[in-house]
Image (cartoon, helix red, strand yellow):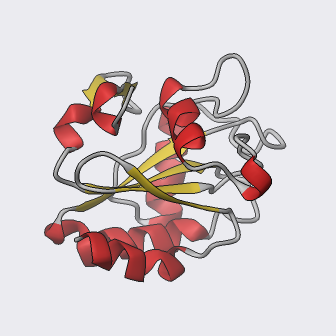
Amino acid sequence: MTTIADFTVSTSKGEPLDLREKLGTVLLVVNTASKCGFTPQYDGLEELYQRYGDKGFEVLAFPCNQFGNQEPGDADEIEQFCKVNFGLTFPLMAKVDVNGGEASPLFDWMKAEAPGLMGSKKIKWNFTKFLIDREGNVVKRYGPADAPKSIAKDIEKLL
């Protein structure tokens, strides 16, 4: 697997999404949770999507329940929560694991391409973000504490 185009994921409705369709788009891939201290970052992610969406940028949010059981709901509950509380318009994907034996192959690949602090390939918490260029390559990994607005300049460079 060499680019994001080599992966297929599931949408929140359980439909397959061939990420080859996203080539030509700058992506911010994020593992999210509805009951996390970082959940207010949904506002910042939506701001980025609104600001750059018409220029070829998209956010792909993957709910994950691996950190403190902070995403216990099903797809409909998660989607409703995000729309009501944050007005999200960017796509929510199916819930995934990001670490361990059941981890999404997409997240395993992104972690290998952009390890965390001290070379760690593990995701430490919700709202870890990966910036993907138009060719489908991982450009940079951001930690949970990195506010979405702090990523804007990196997105602009890729657009």
Q: Residue at x 79, y 55 (%)?
A: 118
Q: Is residue 76 left or right of residue 73?
A: left
Q: Residue at x 79, y 42 (%)?
A: 67
Residue 95 seen in render: no
Figure check: 30 above or below 93: below
Q: Position of residue 111 (x, y in %)?
A: 59, 41
Q: Residue at x 47, y 75 (%)?
A: 151
Residue 56 seen in render: yes
Image quarter for residue 56?
bottom left
Q: Position of residue 50 (x, y in %)?
A: 29, 73
Image quarter for residue 156?
bottom left
Screen quadrant of the N terminus: top left
Q: Is residue 132 left or right of residue 62?
A: left
Q: Position of residue 4 (x, y in %)?
A: 34, 37
Figure check: 132 above or below 79: below
Q: Residue at x 69, y 53 (%)?
A: 116
In the current view of this chain or complex, which residue is farthest to the top?
Answer: 101
Residue closest to the eye, 30 or 121: 121
Screen quadrant of the C terminus: bottom left
In the current view of this chain or complex, which residue is farthest to the right?
Answer: 68
Q: How many marks?
A: 0
Residue closest to the eye, 76 or 130: 130
Q: Position of residue 6 (x, y in %)?
A: 31, 26
